[in-house]
Amino acid sequence: MNPSWTRLTTAIGLAVMTFAAQAQSPYPATPLKPVTDVYHGTAVVDPYRWMEDMKAPEFQAWMKTQSAYAAEQLARLPGRAALRERLGKLSDAGESTGGYDIVAGKLFYLKRAPGQNQARLWLRDDLNGADRELLDPNNLPGEAGNHAIDWYSVAPNGKLLAVGLSKGGSENSVLRVLDLASGKFLSEAIDRTGLNEGGVAWLPDSSGFAYNRHPAEERYNKSAVFLHKLGQNDAKDQALFGWQVSAKQKFALPDLPYLRLSKDSSFALAEVLHGDAVDHSFWVAPVKQLKGAATPWRRVIRPEDRVIAAALAGDTLYALTQKTASRRQLLSLDLAKPHAKFKTVMPAGESVLQSLEVADDAVYVKALDAGVSKLWRVDRKSGKTAAVALPFEGTLRSIAPLKDGKLLVLLEGWTQAPQSLLLNPREPGAAPQLVTVQKPITLDVSGMQAERVMVKSHDGVMVPLSIVAPKDVVLDGSHPTVLTGYGAYGITMEPRFSATRLAWIERGGVLATCHVRGGGELGEEWHQGGYIATKQNTVSDFIACAEWLIANKYTSTAKLAGTGGSAGGITIGGTITQRPDLLAAAQSSVGLSDMLRMENTPNGAPNVAEFGTVTNPVHFKSMYALSPYHRVVDGKAYPAVIVTTGANDPRVEAWIPAKFAARLQAANPESYKSKPTLLRIDFDAGHGMGSSVSQRLDETADVWSFFLWQFGDAAFAPKP
């Protein structure tokens, strides 16, 4: 008998038995329709392949049934209402701002005031002038429902701005152009522009802009850069760079092209993100010769140059490279000299160089050092480098240069509320000045403390762990604790302030962040340490941090929950399946939990660079060993799990977390009695981008209430 057929028929038999057992459970019934794939000689049974047809009435009905069941269970938790009310009050304790941009002497920024559900776009004609609201995304003419500002870009003349608006957390941006004098939109309404996360590139004379657009049949792939002239029908927009624009430039399916223009440069800079790979390619061409497919692009940086960011400063190109240094170095290239070589401007050091911001007189380099932001100033004329002093250890969220050499920054920390500050880097001794863009948040945070420790992982590597806890916390193992981890794309989990965090701290709770490998906290080596074949380290680091919190008596297994979102779904899913004894509860939020089938989604091809491909036998072995959905074992006792997702998620489609929830429910149909698995679905949300404040607070209240129920908090004991 064929071994594959034996495995298949055995799987079908087990599936029928599991379904029969599940039928006796109050969990919503979930049909089992096993499909077997054979990868490099390994047969893998998928009982829920049918869920991948997201539009099928069967799946839509099943999601609504699961959502209703989860809502019913969460409604039984008596403390949930009070917790949600407290979260709302904390969230409305003050204004929150971000996205600072200074153009033509005017300050543009995003702000959410108390009681508002989405950030709105605001303007100050000068730094200390009066605020003027430009755009409320939920007050659009003829548009109902929850809308969000995905991105915005101001024209060089400061009179127009392009903005991406999307509905229901979909990230399906429609590009509109706002006239600031009249407050009205121009005729432009260009769809399929959700990939312009960094904004569009305005022409120096503000007559038009270059933007990225994907084809109607794609969501992330085959995109190109188009040139748009104001008032022109977008059907006539000329393709400049990207998929099938010119035979001279070859593009892979997931390559994402963008155009960058600088007010003082005669060159255009084209950037290519090779899917979600860390390293990019860069091309240049004279701005005056942007002529569609005939544009004379010259490639100056290739993927093997290991450049993660580059920016134009006049006719000089600055680039951050990790080719010979994990923590990166800053290079410069004179574009006016075709045969010029890159020069080292800032050699590698202990800090991880992260991003660039160009000012008239300098280039600013944001860096990460021991978990907090550092800032360096590189003089454009002399090339001299100097550190810029910051008033406290935290995270720089916005850096906006002014004409006079000063900087407007937004700085925050784990326990420091955001502050908008005016820095004068050219005068090192000058004290920073508070600016009223970000008004002080009047919350008493004196009862909260933050610390950073190093934890030994399974292989002896020391992993950073950030802990926010009540002041002078007593280490007796009694504290309800939530541990979070991510670990992908070289992204860093930097110190951020959250007013709503106080609702957990007030209950004596602890919130911790494990800076697992796969992230970028300690440079590219840290990223590579949790990447495809080494991805197990991401999960092992998280487990080590959980064990450290228990061993050092911050908490106990009975009062420890873990969370992971998006790519962090691998982190938390791996912990749930590999160490089910370690946690009392867990949340997988829009989690990547089916690593074998993710590749088949619209966002699959771009992610191959980060997680691997099942077509490669070495990659498959690692992916299959870690894939949370495939690691669930029938009959095993798992922690209580709340799986959360958005029905409109374009990044991790809702069927991926849905499969994981269904598999956990089926593996132990009796788990509903003490360690349930709930699938919470927001039908007006996506991956989290664009969700309203109310949506975010509702989810937090549900998840924290679920955790406190599992921790045995009497206030959250379910009503009959």
Image (spheres, rainbow, N blue to C red):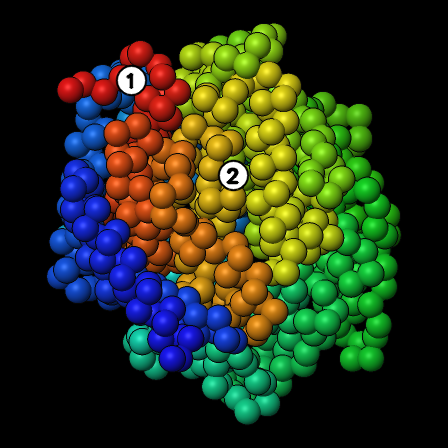
- Residue 176 picture quarter: bottom left
Q: Earlier in the sequence, mark 2 or mark 1?
A: 2
| Residue closest to the eye, 318 or 90 | 90
Task: Categorize mark 1 by other alpha carbons within 10 Å: few (<14), some (14-19), many (20+).
Answer: many
The amino acid sitting under disc 2 is: Arg
Q: Secondary structure at mark 1?
A: helix
* Rendered residue at 26%/36% (across/down): 670
Q: Which residue appears at 60% of the width and 54% of the height? A: 535
Residue at the spot 71% in from the left edge and 30% down from the top edge: 454
The answer to which image quadrant residue 699 occupies is: top left
Residue found at the far bottom of this picture? 247
Question: Would residue 348 be found to the left or right of residue 645 on screen?
Answer: right
Q: CA distance from mark 2 to mark 1?
A: 26 Å
Q: Which mark is residue 579?
A: 2
Q: Residue furthest front?
A: 1
The C terminus - image quarter:
top left
Residue 429's disc is none
Residue 590 is situated, as x and y percent measured from the top left of the image, at 38, 48
Q: Is residue 528 left or right of residue 656?
A: right
Q: Which mark is residue 716?
A: 1
Q: Residue visible at 53% across and 57% down?
A: 625
Secondary structure at numbered mark 2: loop
Bin the neighbour count of mark 2 within 10 Å (Cα to Cα): few under 14, some 14-19, many 20 and up. some
